[in-house]
Amino acid sequence: MITVSNLTRSFGTFTAVDDLSFHLDKGEVAGFLGVNGAGKTTTMRMLTGFLPATRGSVQIAGFDVMRQSLEARKHIGYLPEGVPLYGEHRLREMLEFQARLHGLPRKTANQRIAEVLDRVELSDRAEHLIGKLSKGLRQRAGLAVALLPSPDVLILDEPTSGLDPIQRMSVRKLISELAVEHTVLVSSHILPEIEAVCRRVIILHKGRMAASGTPEELMREFKRESAVTLEAFMPDPTDAARLLATLPGVERVDQGERLGIHTAFKVHCDEDLREDVGALAAAKGWAIRELSFEKPSLERIFARIAFEVDSPEETAPADAPTTGAPMASTPILSELPIAGSAAPVELNVMTEPTAPTAPTEPTKIVYNLNPFDQGRDRDLGKPKSTGGDDA
Amino acid sequence: MVDESKTGGTGKWTRFGFGLQVLAALALAIGACLLVVHLSEWRRARWRADFTASGTNTLDPQTMAILEGLHERVKVDIFFRAASTDHMRVATDQAQTRMNELLFVAKNLLPEKLELEAHNLLDLAAAEKRMQELSLKEVQTVVLSLGDRREVMRLYSDIAEFDYGSENPRSPRPATMHKFRGEEAFAEALKKVSSGDSPRIYFSAGHGEANPTGSEGRDLGLLTTELERQGFVVGTWEGEADGPVPADCDLLAIIGPEQPFSDREREYLETWVDAGGRLFGATETRFGEEPGSVASMLRRYGMLLKRGLVCMPVLDYLGNQTEGLVECTDFRVNERHMNATHEVTESLVERHRKLRFAYARAFDYGGPPEGGLLLELVSSPAESWLDLPDSNFDLDFVLDNNREATGRFRLAMLSTFPVQPLPGETAAPLDADGLAREARVIGVSSPFFLANSTFTTNRDFILNAFNWLAERDFRVGVASRDPERSLIDLKQGNDFALLFHSSLWGLPAIFGLLGFATFLRRRR
Amino acid sequence: MRGVRIVFRREMAGLFLTPLGWVLFLLALVVNGLYFSTYVQVTGGDIGASLSLALGGGYPFWVIMVLFPPLLTMRMISEEARSGMLEFLLTAPIRDVSVIVGKALAATSFLALLMSTNLIYALICQGLGATLDWGHIATALFGTVLVSALFCSIGLVASTLTNTPLIAAFLGVFVNVVMLSMRYLEGVLKGFDPLVRESIMRKVDVLGHFQGSFVRGALDSADIVFFLGWSGVFLFLATRLLEARRWW
């Protein structure tokens, strides 16, 4: 439906959009994500043919937006940033204007207007002056206008900006519903919105495509972002950091500042290593204050791109000692004093709300207190045994 | 982030290029527009329709034909001034406006044929300089010039006719323009300046005639200048010295000689006229009809001179009609006493011109020459009388009913007759148009009729006469169209009050209410 | 053509729904009314002459013609560019040129409507018993429409040049005044051959073309072509500038 190839746009010496290429199929919902000035609006304007591209081409529904502009425009419903509408007109008049622009016959137009108003839940406001509508209603009115000709492609530039959270929710819901029928391209600098609505995310940064894919793909790509945070009291934090680094699957350990008697650690790892860290702490008798896993959220990916944080080292305090993963972990493991028998210990762990299991009841996970019991063979991604019923 | 090798070709230069493209497109568009506008001025592609009821924007087809026939550009200098008296102001302004409009329309229709220049008070120095160039002495004129030829149209005599009203403070009546003749005058003037021929006119000399170039009262300087402006080539002929009338002579004028012509000269003249010559004779004051006088020559063509001078009672300073003064011999004749059908006087009749005769004698009708025509052009008013000299050959300028007759006396006559075939030939010689050539003679009974002192009054008659003699026809008859004025009465009734209040308050109020209603309806 | 009609309808509605349109209308009515009654008085009750003064002969007419079109058009592009409405219009399936022409037509029609209120005076006068030359009046009104078309196109060009309506209005008024003063070019061209000079003048002299035919009650194809041609040039320029805006 949308094919963008090598799209580039310069304003003078400033390149707003640089060599952007992507493709959206019919029915796909994509989100443009980027900080202000990342080139989202420029890209969308080029997609609608409002701005000509310096280089590259855009095809909407098979029509080049510059060469077959009028045909392409018939397939686009565009809601520009700031929702421009004629304030001195009533909503119905504005919709009629849009219907005429798109050449809808009067009968179809009336029918569509009713449908669209119903869709954005503004049926009771049809005769209101647009200028007197509240921001949220106006946003929905704008959507109604963009939707009216039932375009194949809906391009919505910051549809939720300036709305209060509740209005934002309703607009977001509306967009998700629209996604069923139209190819939708939404831009936003607010992540949850994109996450909530889009099955495809395109992250723009300084005019370039920094990342593209489904949220899951992106997370996979940026998985090294995940980390386990441990805050505990221990006699020797440095030693503890070294010990933590020896755990399998740990990339490196950042030792944070000492907070009172507690020391914070950030254990960078690919997977959720809370059990292992917890087991280690239990084994060493550290008093845990916090043990948490930071999921690789889009937000973090986005933040990393937006703030140009290319490597995690840059965020770490310069003076914090960092322990790299040793070349071989076995010697350290052998040094560990193994205390007590390998009796299973019950731990209550709150699972993430997104976890497949019901979050109402804490899941009972049975851990082998000796983590090194079957250490290398065990899949550390899963607890050894789960559930109280089958314990 | 910005890859220089990729953006190098765009950016500033793209914008520059695009700007150039816009400018080029604009230049092309302007060029196309200029071309189209230029083509639209092309006469054949141009369409013009006059939607006014009175047709003020349309020139008479005759005028158009003359304008279209112009080979060169005619320069039109307009020297209009506001009237100096309140009495004349409105009428003058009206006439000037109409003339200006007429010239404007003509200019608009055929811009390449005319060049208009209004010399107003804004640039007095330039106006005066131009007046000097044109050797023009009066304002309220429009001067057409083409090459060396000039034609002056005067506001108060050619362009419009006025009812001068009354300046009497007891019963003031402002002057009004009662007829606008601008288009006719314009067309005639155009015809005159543009006519390509230059007929030769010879003034007879050597017999004490009026000096053709002199500037004294009885001289003909003004006439000569005017003739030259109209394209005549002026020369003199002295029969005794020059021999027969030159072959290139189109017109011979004998203006009040004091000595008789010799027999030889008379023979030259008669032969020449009989062969189709054109003669303008103004009689001398002497009463005798000795051979060689103008009177004797005109007799050949049926114009018999009577004894005596035509006199008219004059008004003295009390407004009473008086006789016995020498001024009785200097009188004016109005259009009622002119021939309304012959082309020489026709236009004068139409324009209510007057003619001034001084020391005029009277013609008697002597019968036309063989196969010819003898016409009376001007006669004196009925109250005139022919003052006859007493036994001492003195004139008393008093009507002596016993001796002297009152009535209408012929003051100017015209005679034409076909040229007889030369001996041995059957057909008479033909002129350029293939018509049988005819001889033309005009006789005027006053020697001072053409003189500087009376020329301004008699100009039209003289020029018409000369042009007719030289077979130049400049007459144009243009129906005058006066735009209908749609008036409402400002003074009586409350028409104006109604108009004033409805236009100043009524309409704005209505539309204000409409606007307010819209505002009210579109509040929510 | 379809686009032109749609944009025209919208702009007409816009002009009559905003206070600016009504304020201008009222102002023009008051000025027209005042001057018309003055003309009637000055000409001694000559309605024909007064109407011809009101429709192009007198200077208040030109004041309205110079001031109003830029005021009408100043918001048409610049404010819409600011509010984003232009983005909406230029991505709608109509041509850019339709947007420009539609807007210019709307402003022209508004002015034509405004000037045709003079017809109401004429009707009143006819009611009062004056016989009017309706052919003359209609021609003058037609000319008025052509002049407003020219000045509205200039106003639109000014409006595309800037995002501030007020600047656009000033710019428009300035260009209009320049267009009107083209007649004084004649003084500059004094040195040229009169034929050449007049030929140049006839290409640019707005006042001359208007007063040469329309005010006098005549229609002249050359004058119509002149006004349409120059309006076309300015509309073309406005369209190109609208396109060029996208590059800036």
Image (tube, rainbow, N blue to C red):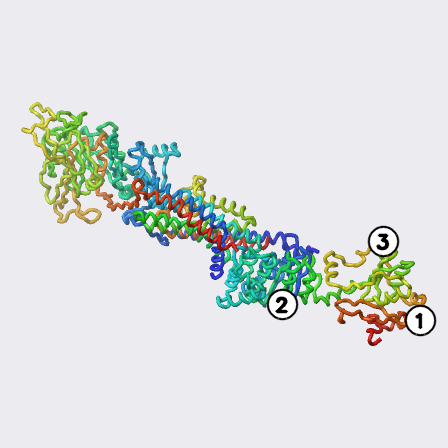
Label placed on residue A341: 1
Viewer can see residue B256: no
Q: What's the residue at 79%, 56% (across, down)?
A: A315
Q: Secondary structure at mark 3?
A: loop
Sequence-earlier tag: 3 or 1: 3
Mark 3 and mark 1: span between their CA atoms?
39 Å
Q: Nearer the observer, disc 3 or disc 1? A: 1
Relative to A371, does residue A11 appear above or below in the rendering? above
Label placed on residue A177: 2
State which chain disc 3 sits on. Answer: A
Q: Position of residue A146 (x, y in %)?
A: 57, 63
Relative to A77, does residue C149 appear above or below in the rendering? above
Label placed on residue A188: none
Amino acid, disc 2: Glu
Q: Are marks 3 and 1 on the same chain?
A: yes
Total count of labels? 3
State yes or no: discs 3 and 1 in contact (Cβ < 8 Å): no
Sequence-earlier tag: 1 or 2: 2
* Residue labelled with disc 3: A319
Q: Quadrant of residue B125?
A: top left
Amino acid, disc 1: Ser
State yes or no: discs 3 and 2 in contact (Cβ < 8 Å): no
Horizontally, residue C156 falls left or right of residue B138, namely: right
Q: Nearer the observer, disc 3 or disc 2? A: 2
Mark 3 and mark 2: span between their CA atoms?
50 Å
Amino acid, disc 3: Asp
Mark 1 and mark 2: span between their CA atoms?
57 Å
Q: What's the residue at 61%, 52% (across, down)?
A: B13
Q: Position of residue B234 (x, y in %)?
A: 25, 35
